[in-house]
Image: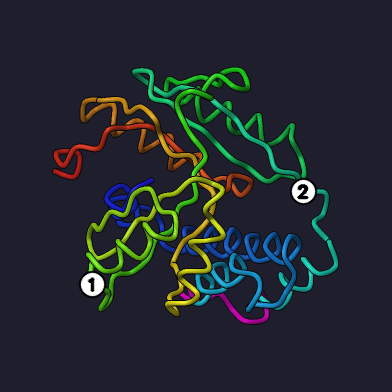
Amino acid sequence: MGRKWNNIKEKKGDQDKQRSLIYTKSLREVTKAVKNGGSEIESNFLLRIALEKCRKYNVPKDNIDRAIKKGLGNEDEGYEDIAYEGYGPNGVAIFVEASTNNVTRTIANVRNFFNKCGGSIGTTGCLQFVFERKAVFEIAQGKLNEDDFTLELIDAGAEDVILEDGYFTVTAAMESFGSIQNKLDQMKITAEEAGLERVPLTFKEIDKETFKTITKLVDLLESDDDVTKVYHNVQYDDSFAED
């Protein structure tokens, strides 16, 4: 949802609870990556990203090994991917992606979170003109030269390369995911995050109070084990970070 938004969120909340959620969701990404692309790290780019994330957050190796075995054995425990579209206060668009083995439980939780924050779930497809699926990569700058790296990625199919707070955010059409992945492999660069995400086509300007409510709604949604991603179209303002 943007590095500034994430940096603010990471300063909040119970650390033990956050760590548990990170473990659960990181391991689920490992299982899903293995299930879809096998366990060979060299040929499964998304598995490499998931394993890098596990290492970053010190997820125990035994847990990672079990997640890989689960993916190889297709032991997904009946999980299915599902999405919910809705609006928060002041018409902020909220798109929720979830992976669940109990749709009734998940929809009840998601609806409750929206209701608590003055929002509501809409019909499927109501946000089709608000978000667009894009290939998105997040890469630490390190010693990379901004101009050279940007040109390399644009040649590989990137539509946009933005450097902010020491990280590149690379955005491209869904169809360019593979070519950018290959370019990063050639450059021996491992992205910190990579995948298909929902990027806002239009942004909503809001005041600070609404931002606080949207933050609360996103926190509630992301605290649910079944929720994997939450997208919104808030136009970020630096004043939101002020106490």
Please tell me whether residue 16 belongs to the stretch shown in magenta: no
- Front tag of 2 and 1: 1
Is residue 186 shown above or below 231?
A: below
Q: Nearer the viewer, residue 228 or 184?
A: 184
Residue occupied by mark 1:
145
- Compared across the picture, whether 72 is left or right of 59 comes to right
For the N terminus, which image quadrant?
A: top left
Residue occupied by mark 2:
79
For label 2, the crowd category at 10 Å Cα-Cα, with few meaning under 14, some 14 to 19 and many 20 or more, is some
Q: Please report the bounds of the magenta region as a residue range.
A: 56-63
For label 1, the crowd category at 10 Å Cα-Cα, with few meaning under 14, some 14 to 19 and many 20 or more, is few
Q: Nearer the viewer, residue 239 or 175?
A: 175
Tag on residue 42? Answer: none
Quadrant in the rendering for residue 201: top left
Instruction: Mark 2 or mark 1: name the one nearer the start of the chain.
Output: 2
Residue beneath the point at 42% across and 20% down:
118
Q: Distance between the Cα atoms at labels 2 and 1?
A: 42 Å
